[in-house]
């Protein structure tokens, strides 16, 4: 049962920021994650500020410099089916098409997908874990088959987004609006590792909301892709995934960004894999070395060691597919 709350629908970003100054106020966009969190009493919300009717926050359009602007309220389906996105950044269209189920993609927004809460069953359950202000992560010594193998520190969640890793690979940024005014944040810097603060998912300040996502113009010859492996084909979250942005010239890799999903508390950029392929041809020997480098620093838990060979296989298959 949902708790009682006050619900408002501001007509402008400025008005929304003003309402978000109220105690225990939260943003409501598509609501696909928020309503589940409220039902499970993951956090306290007394004021729901719905931004769903602010027209300025929607739309997908090409920018003057050849990049793309995506409004925070653009649905995941709109991103997946956009001809512009499919032409310039097919990896983002692939990532969006892998999110949840068709019904949730129709309702959920890109801004919300970047800001969603962890899916850890301890965090979502009746456990006072470290992410809720407790003194321990119950995944340590508990059921941790779906938890992280990189960057765990005090909390071992995995980041649930399929679009965030691709946006990191594409060097995208988000524009925000809050009480202190607007700012621009690289998506690579948007999410907070547990070692910095285990109680926060993003660097957004209280009352600050994402207004749009900006992707720079693709360099000539850029190839992007996203691969997701999950337990079921329908709508599970990633066990392991990989976003890839490559530029290959005369058979040699000149630019590479490799970002993993499903294996870390934040979209996990693998500089080790990038360094293994930069300046080289993607032959089988190079691809094998890149896969080994990608998992070199992995630290599996008791029940998720299978993610290491799984991730290696994902790296190999995706790189081989980009000769």
Image: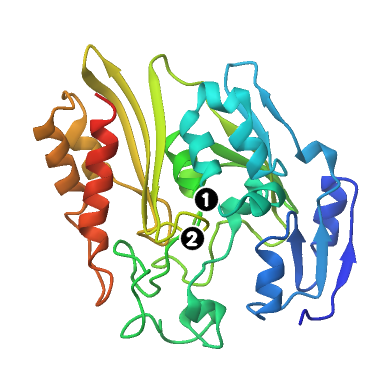
Tell whether 243 sits left or right of 9: left
Q: How many marks?
A: 2
Instruction: Tell me which residue sits at (82%, 70%) in the image.
Output: 47
For label 1, the SS is: loop
Tell whether 314 sits left or right of 128: left
The residue sitting at 87% across, 45% down in the picture is 12
Q: Position of residue 119 (x, y in %)?
A: 51, 68
Q: Are marks 2 and 1 in contact (CB under 8 Å)?
A: no
Q: Which of label 2 and label 1 is nearer to you? A: 2
- According to the picture, the residue beneath numbered tag 2 turns out to be 236
Q: Earlier in the sequence, mark 2 or mark 1?
A: 1
Query: Does residue 186 appear in this view?
Result: no
Work out which quarter of the rendered image holds the C terminus and state it. top left
Can you see residue 44?
A: yes
Q: Nearer the viewer, residue 239 or 170?
A: 239
What kind of element bears circle 2? loop
* 10 Å crowding of disc 1: few (<14), some (14-19), many (20+): many
Q: Residue at x 81, y 50 (%)?
A: 52
How far across and down, in percent of the image, does residue 295 sit?
20, 54
Spatial CA distance of label 2 from label 1 is 24 Å
Residue 178 lies left or right of residue 205; in this view the side is right
Colouring scheme, one of rainbow, by chain, secondary structure, one colour: rainbow
């Amino acid at each position: 049962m949902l708790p009682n709350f006050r619900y408002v629908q501001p007509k402008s970003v400025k008005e929304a920021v003003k309402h978000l100054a109220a105690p225990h106020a939260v943003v409501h966009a598509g609501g696909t994650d928020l309503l589940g969190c409220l039902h499970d009493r993951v956090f306290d919300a007394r004021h729901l500020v719905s931004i769903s009717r602010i027209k300025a926050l929607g739309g997908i359009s090409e920018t003057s410099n050849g990049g793309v602007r995506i409004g925070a309220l653009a649905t995941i389906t709109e991103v997946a089916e956009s001809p512009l996105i499919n032409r310039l950044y097919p990896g983002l269209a692939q990532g969006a098409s892998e999110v949840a189920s068709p019904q949730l993609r129709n309702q959920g927004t890109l801004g919300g997908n970047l800001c969603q809460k962890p899916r850890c069953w301890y965090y979502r359950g009746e456990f006072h874990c470290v992410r809720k202000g407790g003194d321990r992560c119950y995944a340590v010594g508990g059921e941790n088959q779906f938890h992280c193998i990189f960057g765990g520190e005090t909390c071992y969640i995995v980041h649930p987004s399929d679009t965030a890793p691709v946006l990191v690979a594409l060097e995208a940024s988000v524009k925000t609006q809050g009480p202190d005014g607007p700012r621009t944040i690289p998506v690579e810097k948007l999410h907070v590792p547990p070692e910095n603060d285990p109680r926060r998912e993003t660097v957004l300040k209280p009352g600050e909301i994402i207004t749009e996502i900006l992707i720079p113009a693709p360099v000539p010859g850029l190839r992007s892709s996203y691969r997701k492996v999950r337990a079921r084909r329908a709508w599970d979250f990633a066990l392991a995934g990989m976003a890839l942005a490559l530029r290959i010239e005369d058979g040699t890799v000149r630019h590479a960004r490799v970002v993993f999903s499903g294996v870390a508390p934040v979209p996990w950029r693998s500089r080790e894999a990038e360094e293994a392929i930069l300046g080289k041809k993607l032959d089988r020997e190079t691809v094998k070395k890149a896969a080994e480098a990608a998992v070199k620093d992995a630290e599996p838990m008791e029940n998720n060691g299978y993610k290491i060979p799984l991730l290696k296989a994902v790296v190999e298959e995706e790189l081989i597919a980009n000769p």
